[in-house]
Amino acid sequence: MNEYRSVKKIMRARRTKEGAGVVLNRAIGFGDPYECDPFLLFDDFSSDDPDDFVKGFPWHPHRGIETITYVLKGEVEHEDSLGNKGKIGKGDIQWMTAGSGIYHQEMPLGDGSGKMQGFQLWANLPKKHKMTTPKYRGVLSKDLPEIRKENGTTVRVIAGRYDDVTGPVKDVVIDPEYFDIAIPQGIEYVQGTTPGHRVLFYVYGGTGYIETSLKGSVKKEKIESRNMVLFGDGERIKIAAGDSELRFLMISGRPINEPIAWYGPIVMNTDEELRAAYDELQKGTFVKAQR
């Protein structure tokens, strides 16, 4: 196994529309659904123009996945078929397990100046957990631990373990790591990773360089804002910030390695299960859990 992970692929987020007409940048979700297993989709719905996001994501179903929403500017108002409702504010995280089925809506509101910065990740669920009872893990910004390294790098820990600190989102079946990392201008940083896990970096500020070595030669891959970086296997990643602060999300999880049958907001293992889910939507029997 390589000590340092190499860059397997750099994916540029692509502008698209979702929900009732939200303009966003999608970094995962267009190509091979197995490529980033256990992660299926990643959307960056950041904008300085309220017209891009105010139409929101009205009532829609989910089954078989988890949706992870992280907000850095503005607010997202949410409500679901189980009676939960509230707002995801600046620096907050919501980790929703759709499981057996849920209806919900998410309406980005922006901040006082009309700006919105947020991300949504979809994580797949293994077959034996597809029909688990839906639940939320909502964490406020003040409850997310932040570590400051000697070189000035800061790490917000959402899920997983960093040094001796464990993030507040726990007991997730794919054993995820989700860190928000900021590296000062010109500083080099080494991030440890779990061998065998899928590792992704999403850059949302600045530029940087990932250093890898192959057959004795050193190669530096440039990464910039709205790049999603998919890595090969290994124990750590070496990265340096460019001429400004580099900000990125590190997303890691254990691959599920199961068949994927995916249409719209529902992800199952077989086409038969997918058809059954949509039949239940038509019959009004989709939601299994009650208020």
Image (cartoon, helix red, strand yellow):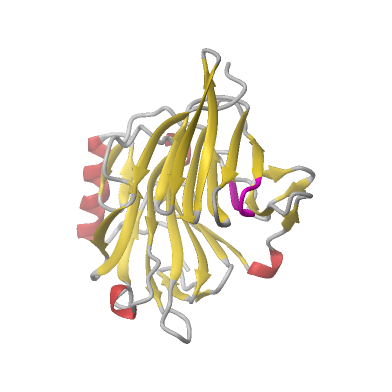
Is 289 left, or right, of 168 in this rendering? left
Q: Measuring 23% from the left and 36% from the top, which residue is drawn there? A: 271
Nearest to the observer: residue 133 or residue 38: 38
Whether residue 277 is visible: yes
The picture quadrant where one finds residue 20 is bottom left
Q: Which residue lies furthest to the top in this view?
A: 215
What is the x, y in percent for residue 169? 63, 53
Nearest to the observer: residue 224 or residue 5: 224
Task: Give the total number of marks visible in the rendering.
Answer: 0
Bounds of the magenta span?
A: 178-187
Indicate whether 45 appears above or below 176.
below
Is residue 179 a member of the stretch shown in magenta? yes
Quadrant of the frame with the N terminus: top right
Is 100 left, or right, of 262 in this rendering? right
Q: Which residue lies furthest to the bottom in this view?
A: 112
What is the x, y in percent for residue 119? 44, 60
What is the x, y in percent for residue 139? 62, 64
Nearest to the observer: residue 186 or residue 257: 186
Is residue 110 a member of the stretch shown in magenta? no
Q: Measuring 54% from the left and 22% from the top, which residue is drawn there? A: 213
The picture quadrant where one finds residue 49 is bottom left
Indicate whether 199 appears above or below 25.
above
Whether residue 197 is visible: no
Q: Measuring 33% from the left and 30% from the top, which residue is drawn there? A: 259
| Main secondary structure found in the magenta portion | strand
What is the x, y in percent for residue 236? 62, 31
Q: Measuring 42% from the left and 35% from the top, which residue is drawn there? A: 37
